[in-house]
Amino acid sequence: MISWCVFCKTGSEKNVVQLMTALNNRLEAIAPVRVLQEKRKGKWQQREQILFPGYVFLYAEEEIDFELIKRIPGFYKVLGNESNLKKLQGTDYEYSMWIYRHQGHIETSKVLTIGRTVKVIDGPLLDGFGTIVKLDKHKRRIWVDFEFDGQMRTVSLSAECVEME
């Protein structure tokens, strides 16, 4: 499986995914979303939010021609790296495949807290991608650091806490 990441106009990710998929049926495009738990009027609700505004991941079994894709409204460019190769490699590729394994839908992870130690016991973070840097039990959020496109990034994801005494 080959993967790429494209930069597009923020807010147009879902439209770009639909147009790319329509142009090339051998291509799978994903605008990853995170499912966040939020408390509204005293009740927990789930809400989807784009994980990386302005980014869409592409997957195919073989190389693809980007000439048609470049004409899509809102499309800016295919991200490259130091060697100017367009396909993702190394940790960027690993991250893209983590997104792919979860079909771009990052659900709530369950974490076990023992004192100050946090261990993921279920959900997307069980794959061990990234480093947990902060946990807010009351807001059911966990912050994860990881490297993508040569930069350290931090995202907050939903997490249900299970405490052990």
Image (cartoon, helix red, strand yellow):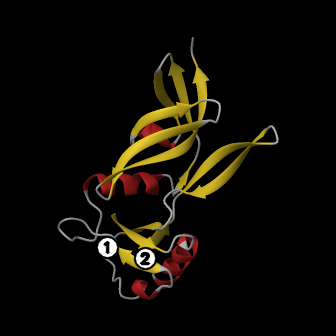
In x, y percent, where is residue 88? 30, 63
**What residue did someone put label 1 on?**
62
**What residue did someone put label 2 on?**
26
In x, y percent, where is residue 142? 53, 37
Q: What is the quadrant of residue 33 in the picture?
A: bottom right
| Disc 2 residue crowd, few under 14, some 14–19, many 20+, Cα 10 Å | some
From the viewer's side, name the closer residue of 164 and 43: 43
Q: What residue is drawn where x is 37% and y is 46%?
A: 146
In x, y percent, where is residue 3? 35, 65
Instruction: Measure the C-alpha gap from mark 1 to mark 2.
Output: 9 Å
From the viewer's side, name the closer residue of 121 and 158: 158
Q: Is residue 8 above or below residue 127?
A: below
Q: What residue is drawn where x is 46% and y is 37%?
A: 126
Total marks in image: 2
From the viewer's side, name the closer residue of 104 and 40: 40
Q: Is residue 79 above or below residue 67?
A: above
For this orientation, the residue located farthest to the top is: 165
Q: Earlier in the sequence, mark 1 or mark 2?
A: 2
Q: What residue is drawn where x is 30% and y is 75%?
A: 63
Q: What residue is drawn where x is 81% and y is 37%?
A: 42
